[in-house]
Image: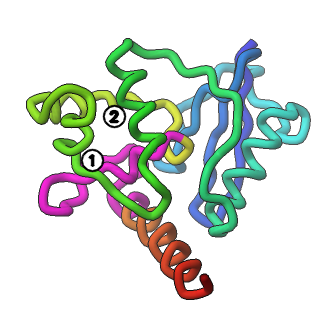
Amino acid sequence: MLCNATLPTPFGLFTLSADDIGLRGLLFPAEQPPLPPGSLVALASQPLLAEAGQQLLAYLAGRLHRFDLPLSIHGTPFQQQVWAQLRAIPYGETLTYGELAACIGGRQKARAVGGAAHANPLAIIIPCHRLIGAGGKLTGFGGGLAMKQALLDLERQNRDQEKKEA
């Protein structure tokens, strides 16, 4: 059964969705569509949603660099391949669409990589914000370019701080 819960964060109100298998969706504050009646539950009432909420808050506070949650993501084999590559981009680093496309068969697939990233149902958890345009240009992101920049800045600041402390 699909259930949804909202999570207030310093970045705004997110909506988390889960089914019996795992976390299925994360919506940004700017993406809040109407939810089906009865599908909104208290975050604490569902252990997976509660854990996802705790991990998302820890990530947004700079204390978590990699999510450890069961996922229930559905997509084409190509989308699944792109999403796996997105999860492999290290915290605080970025790849261009072309660089990721080269990892999975050729730079000519850069536009298709963009389409798969756009279809990512679990942005942040599957970190499509780490995917940038050629020359470092920020391009489309479900949460908006300001959110994408804020997430990249958060990761870079934490990564740089950890390097100083090491």
Residue drawn where x is 69% and y is 41% of the image? 68
Whether the magenta-drawn stretch holds residue 70 is answered as no
Is 143 contained in the magenta span? yes
Mark pair 1, 2: CA separation: 8 Å
Q: Is residue 161 above or below residue 59?
A: below
Q: Residue at x 73, y 42 (%)?
A: 52
| Amino acid type at mark 1 | Gly
**CB atoms at circles 1 and 2 under 8 Å apart?**
yes
Q: Position of residue 132 (x, y in %)?
A: 26, 53
Left or right, 35 with reference to 118: right
Q: Secondary structure at mark 2?
A: helix
Boundaries of the magenta span: 126-148
Give the residue at mark 2: 118
Sequence-wise, the earlier of marks 1 and 2 is 2
10 Å neighbourhood of mark 1: few (<14), some, or many (≥20)?
A: some
Residue at the spot of label 1: 140
